[in-house]
Amino acid sequence: MKISKTSLVSSVALLPLIALAYSVLGGTGGAATAAPQTERAGSAEAQPLTCHFEPNQHGAFRLESSVHDTRAPAQEDRLTGVLSWQVAENLSATRWRLRAALANVEHGQSLTRPEERVSGSLDAPFFIDVDAACRFVGFGFDRRWSPRKRQLVQTAISTWEHVLPADPTAKRWRVEQRDGMGAYEASYERLPGRGVGVQRTKAAYKEQDTARTLGLTLQVLGARSTARFDSGWLLRAGGRERMRIEASGSLQADLVQRFSVVKDDARFTPVPPMAADDADFGDAFAMAVDRTQQVDSSLQAMPFEKALSDFVRLLEQADTSFAAARQLAAWLRANPDKAQR
């Protein structure tokens, strides 16, 4: 299980916790690569459904993402800015590496707890690897960036990943994807109109069953977005998601996320130079846990029920989210066989 919506925009209350615990067991934030399951439409126009980039191509997007808890809507995390990108390298016939940077960033974090907020500038260049299906298959960040800063940017961009099928006649298809919360199956439907338009629906995260083992309930109440493609990549995308999280029957979060991204090449500014060898392409979410930490032998005798009750107790106290996560992660490290129950 990996639940870190290091935001729908930034790390929010409960959400980074299970990422810490799950990472001990080998969870990852890497891109999912399951082949799409498609339903063909005999009358559909066989227009190519692929992303494609030319050498030295460049562009820009205006992006906005926000999240609030319905119980306190005035408290909101928000990220807005302009993402400039340019082709840095052709990795293969179906994969490209883009060098990108954010500018004109406005980043509010009134929802996120102070100890979990991202600090510092977000204007350093980074890399995004994109394949012909328009998946984001890799991210490379400045090695000096903190895990939370990397997770923030990766999550904000991954939110607008819409995957195209290999079959140009596909009317509906399903693929496995991954965002800051974890893995989920996305259902797609081709939209009418000029160009390539798709609608994405997310029903549930695959981690929900494992979360239930830890006394958590994840409920996706509505997650739908649309996207249109033009000239080899995204023209615009936007959507709304709502998720409720409960711990032992107590509501911890009722979150609503909205996001939008719009192509605006007139806002492009040259991306500062950066060599791929100087970037870290490791999993930003796996960085949250020190895997070299020694096992606490005193925890090996602790029953699962006691570890879980301590976790929930800490969750219900102010400013103890990371303490709760670290304690649960330590118990999982000391009891890997029980963690699979």
Image (tube, rainbow, N blue to C red):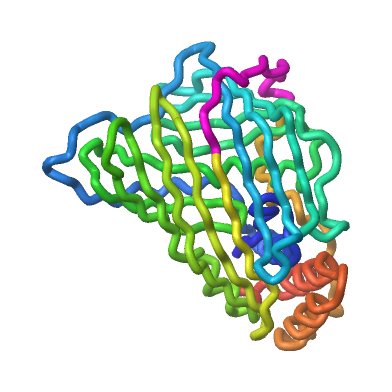
Determine the residue located farthest toward the left in the rendered image.
42
Q: Which residue is drawn at 78% across and 52% down?
A: 109
**Magenta-tinted stretch:** 261-278
Q: Which residue is drawn at 71% across and 33% down?
A: 141
Q: Residue at x 68, y 27 (%)?
A: 101
Residue 17 at x, y = what percent?
A: 73, 65
Q: In this view, does 214 lie to the left or right of 108?
A: left
Q: Can residue 24 be seen in this view?
A: no
Residue 138 at x, y = what percent?
A: 57, 36
Residue 334 at x, y = what percent?
A: 76, 72
Residue 35 at x, y = what percent?
A: 35, 47
Is 38 in the magenta?
no
Q: Is residue 175 visible?
A: yes
Residue situated in front as seen by the camera: 285 or 46: 46
Q: In this view, does 313 lie to the left or right of 174?
A: right
For residue 322, above or below residue 341: above
Q: Which residue is drawn at 45% across and 20% down?
A: 53
